[in-house]
Image (tube, rainbow, N blue to C red):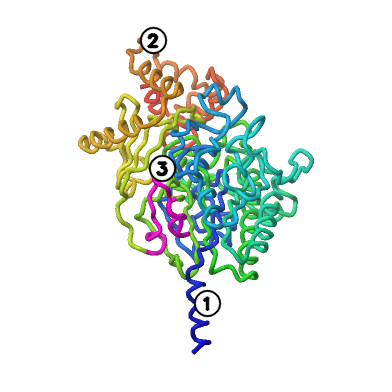
């Protein structure tokens, strides 16, 4: 009887033990940048393994289009605009120009704060980017027992200036630190942020990493990529090199994650460890100066990329694995999950109460994570983007407020005008603006977006955006009418009825944008402009 009671006590203790949590946040990994997500070239067997052994939330949204505000939401369950984090943290002058602080306020309650108070050992390894430089708090000020980071004032992960392949080896360093931390704390619950540097630019894989893709021959018209690749790489001579470097970097990231999974197994911690993997935002833009090979990242079928609130900029992987607790092999299509839900969900799983004064913007979705059917959100998800949009394409820049409520996603400006409306389950690529067909939905969601915006602290950056919108609405001066048919005839030197690139580009005032402009005008994608295409482009 005594042995039976002892066994029962051990069983109850094991059940009561909260799980370890490892949060892997990759950097600029697009929604299509994994084998399981349909990428035609990259090898990601360990990410594929996470999908097989866990749940993939296919409608998982980060709270911003770039890194610092996105990370703010994961840490606080607050929309980043509540902390005036409108863009990435930079130097003081750049932050001040965007009406931003120089770092996330260390007095704000974070998830590591709550878990540490509940007895968790806490650590942060990898990228920080929540504020650095003179006077910035180290990661330990935000609830971490230990840290080794990049972009912070805390202990450094390494010296990128002295090691030419530092970024290529950085994920391995983070995994080393995470394994050591797990070994040291295997008898108590622990929480780790492992925030990678890749596939953010600039990428420079080692020769050994590159060798995996020595024979890669990518094609811009590969159906797996969609329209974005045709826009970007229809005439890119270095696509092969760019894609080799990108895929090599991602595959090493995957290899290191596999090493972490294997080490957890060796330590007997697999079943006690909840792993969450996401990216901070969509893939980088090929046209950004420092993007280099990172610009070939794929948003899959989604519209736009990093720095845009269209799906390709804010919809990322939501992979969750916890053997025996989170359903294996589940692909959850219906649930709308946000980064702001991360704190209340992890807190609930860990048995930690979220104080009311934290005023979380997110919801506890722990039942959903454990396998409950998807139900409508209690509150809509919101975004505000006040910075510039990269890329030469107009479809990068919707109005600056966004709300996702049920199946609907609405964009609108701060005056309540210029609405765009999309039915996301039916149109994940956001091709069809249906605002005109659903004025009632536009009215309801516009009211929600504007009411939410009123809860945000005042910001000169917001005032600037609002005033720019008013200027746009002012009557424009009439432009001189161009005789485009006559211009076409003059440029068509060989008189074949079409404009080749060589005939079109020299006449453009903006030579940097000229190739992209040609591609935009070329509606049938045959590599030349008919007179109809050229004339229509001016209307």
User: Which label sits on residue 480?
Assistant: 2
Name which of mark 3 and mark 2 comes first in the sequence: 3
Q: Dot 3: within a 10 Å radius of its alpha carbon, few (fewer than 14), some, or many (20 or more) residues?
A: few
- Cα separation, mark 3 vs mark 2, equals 59 Å
- Cα separation, mark 2 vs mark 1, equals 83 Å
Q: Is residue 222 left or right of residue 330?
A: right
Q: Is residue 191 left or right of residue 166?
A: left
Under circle 2, the secondary element is loop
Quarter occupied by residue 81: top left
What range is drawn magenta here? 344-371
Tell me whether circle 2 and circle 1 mark residues in contact (CB < 8 Å): no
Quarter occupied by residue 286: top right
Residue 358: say if magenta.
Answer: yes
Q: Nearer the viewer, mark 2 or mark 1?
A: 1
Q: Dot 2: within a 10 Å radius of its alpha carbon, few (fewer than 14), some, or many (20 or more) residues?
A: few
Tell me the residue that label 1 is attached to: 10
Tell me whether circle 3 and circle 1 mark residues in contact (CB < 8 Å): no
Please tell me which residue is depicted at 64% across the width and 31% down the height of the picture. 135
**How many numbered tags mark residues here?**
3
Q: Is residue 283 left or right of residue 383?
A: right
Percent x, y of residue 287: 57, 32
Tell me the residue that label 3 is attached to: 357
Which quadrant, please, contains the C terminus?
top left
């Amino acid at each position: 009887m005594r042995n039976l009671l002892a066994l029962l006590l051990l069983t109850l203790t094991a059940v009561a033990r909260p799980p370890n949590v490892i949060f892997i946040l990759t950097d600029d990994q697009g929604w299509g940048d994994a084998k399981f997500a349909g990428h035609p070239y990259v090898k990601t067997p360990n990410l594929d393994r996470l999908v097989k052994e866990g749940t993939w939330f296919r409608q998982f949204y980060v709270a911003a289009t770039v890194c610092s505000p996105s990370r703010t939401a994961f840490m606080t369950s607050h929309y980043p605009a509540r902390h005036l984090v409108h863009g990435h943290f930079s130097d003081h002058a750049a932050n001040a120009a965007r009406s931003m602080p120089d770092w996330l306020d260390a007095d704000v309650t974070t998830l590591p704060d709550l878990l540490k108070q509940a007895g968790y050992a806490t650590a942060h390894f990898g990228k920080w980017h929540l504020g650095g430089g003179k006077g910035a708090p180290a990661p330990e000020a935000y609830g971490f027992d230990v840290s080794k980071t990049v972009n912070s004032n805390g202990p450094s992960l390494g010296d990128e200036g002295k090691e030419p392949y530092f970024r290529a080896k950085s994920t391995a360093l983070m995994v080393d630190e995470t394994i050591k931390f797990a070994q040291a704390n295997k008898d108590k619950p622990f929480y780790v942020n492992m925030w990678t540097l890749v596939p953010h630019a600039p990428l420079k894989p080692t020769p050994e990493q590159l060798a995996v893709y020595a024979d890669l021959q990518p094609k811009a018209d590969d159906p797996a990529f969609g329209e974005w690749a045709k826009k970007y790489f229809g005439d890119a001579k270095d696509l092969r090199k760019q894609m080799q470097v990108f895929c090599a970097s991602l595959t090493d990231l995957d290899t290191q994650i596999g090493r972490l999974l294997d080490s957890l197994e060796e330590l007997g911690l697999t079943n006690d460890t909840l792993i969450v993997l996401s990216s901070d935002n969509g893939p980088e833009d090929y046209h950004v100066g420092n993007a280099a090979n990172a610009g070939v990242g794929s948003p899959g079928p989604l519209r736009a990329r990093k720095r845009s609130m269209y799906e390709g900029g804010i919809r990322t992987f939501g992979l969750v694995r916890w053997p025996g607790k989170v359903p294996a092999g589940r692909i959850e299509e219906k649930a709308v999950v946000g980064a702001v839900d991360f704190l209340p969900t992890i807190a609930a799983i860990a048995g930690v109460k979220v104080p009311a004064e934290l005023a979380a913007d997110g919801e506890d979705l722990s039942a959903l994570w454990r396998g409950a059917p998807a139900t409508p959100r209690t509150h809509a998800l919101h975004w505000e983007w006040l910075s510039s949009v990269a890329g030469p394409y107009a479809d990068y820049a919707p109005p600056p407020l966004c709300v996702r409520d049920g199946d609907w996603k609405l964009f609108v400006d701060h005056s309540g005008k210029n609405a765009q409306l999309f039915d996301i389950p039916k149109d994940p690529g956001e091709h069809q603006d249906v605002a005109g067909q659903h004025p009632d939905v536009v009215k309801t969601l516009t009211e929600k977006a504007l009411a939410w915006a009123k809860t945000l602290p005042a910001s000169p950056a917001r005032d600037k955006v609002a005033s720019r919108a008013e200027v746009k609405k002012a009557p424009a001066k009439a432009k001189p009418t161009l005789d485009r048919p006559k211009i076409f005839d003059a440029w068509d030197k060989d008189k074949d009825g079409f404009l080749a690139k060589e005939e079109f580009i020299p006449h453009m005032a903006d030579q940097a944008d000229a190739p992209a402009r040609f591609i935009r005008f070329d509606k049938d994608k045959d590599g030349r402009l008919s007179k109809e295409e050229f004339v229509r482009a001016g209307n």
